[in-house]
Amino acid sequence: MARRVLIVDDEPPIRTVLSAYLEADGFDVVQAGTGADALKRVLDVSEPVDLVLLDVGLPDLNGIEVLTMIRAKSEVPVILVTARSEEVDKLVGLSVGADDYITKPFSPREVVARVNTVLRRTQRPAADEGTVDPVLRFSGDLSIDPDRREVLVAGASKELSALDFDLLWALANAPGRVFSRAQLLEKVWGYDFYGDDRVVDVHIRSLRSSLGDDATNPAIVGTVRGVGYKFLPRTEEA
């Protein structure tokens, strides 16, 4: 069965072009021109959608508001589309549960590539029954449970988006190792990622914010200037 993508944008020409490219790649596409219509379609269990392309600048509800309401009811992957260059929209969107973002103007081919990447990441096959990945425990009372996708800092659960969790997991599996943006794109986004490698910086900021990690004096995710990022806590000895 073809995977269904919901395009939410108040500009019909954009919906038409994206629909053509996505359908050519084998997707079933439905459209919405307002936030209210988008919410109805997302919550329609008779025709479930597999991913939402959500424009931030909608005529009735702000896209961030729509995303917040979606997250209250559904874990469907959402890619935000924004016409603004400021990172605040991206960071706010990621903090309330967006799986990725795309900035206008964009290439329709880039959108299709990002849709495929997000779906591949969020719809991984379940682990074999009986297999359990170990919980990683670190200094500073930090633990990461990959099966529950749960992060605890000093006993408090931290809410992370699917992509931010995968980014943290990639770093935490090699404490102290410095990863370049390109290496993190390969490990987390996939070989065929199509876009600006600065998306890594945006997600690092989102990850730090979710973990309560001070960017000016980080204790969890460190910056190595001119190179990339590394995981700072030490593995807790058994």
Image (cartoon, grey):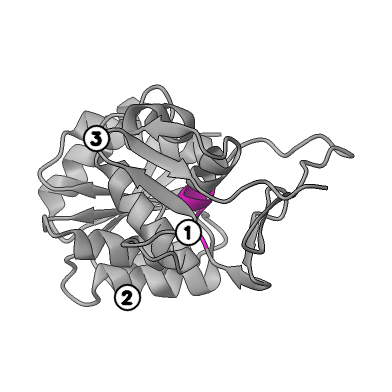
Q: Secondary structure at mark 1?
A: loop
Q: Residue at x 40, y 27 (%)?
A: 183
Q: Which residues are magenta?
A: 160-165
Q: How far, Cα to Cα, is label 3 from label 2?
A: 36 Å
- Looking at this view, is 191 or 104 the one in front? 191
Check residue 131 for magenta coloring: no
Q: For the stretch drawn in magenta, what is the main secondary structure?
A: helix
Splitting the image into 4 quarters, where does residue 37 fall?
A: bottom left
- The residue pinned by badge 3 equals 226
Q: How far, Cα to Cα, is label 2 from label 1?
A: 32 Å
Q: Residue furthest right?
A: 130
- The residue pinned by badge 2 equals 65
- The residue pinned by badge 1 equals 219
Q: Residue at x 45, y 41 (%)?
A: 230
125 left or right, relative to 192: right
Q: Secondary structure at mark 3?
A: loop
Q: How far, Cα to Cα, is label 3 from label 1?
A: 19 Å
Q: Look at label 3 and name its amino acid.
A: Gly
Nearer the observer: mark 2 or 1; the answer is: 1
175 left or right, relative to 197: right
- Looking at this view, is 163 or 45 the one in front? 163
- Do we see residue 36 in this rendering? no
- Looking at this view, is 165 or 175 the one in front? 175
Picture coordinates of residue 172, whole percent (x, y): 57, 43
Picture coordinates of residue 202, whole percent (x, y): 29, 51
Neighbourhood count class around disc 2 (C-alpha, 10 Å): few under 14, some 14–19, many 20 upward: some
Q: Is residue 44 above or below residue 181?
A: below
Nearer the observer: mark 3 or 2; the answer is: 3
Picture coordinates of residue 222, whole percent (x, y): 40, 49
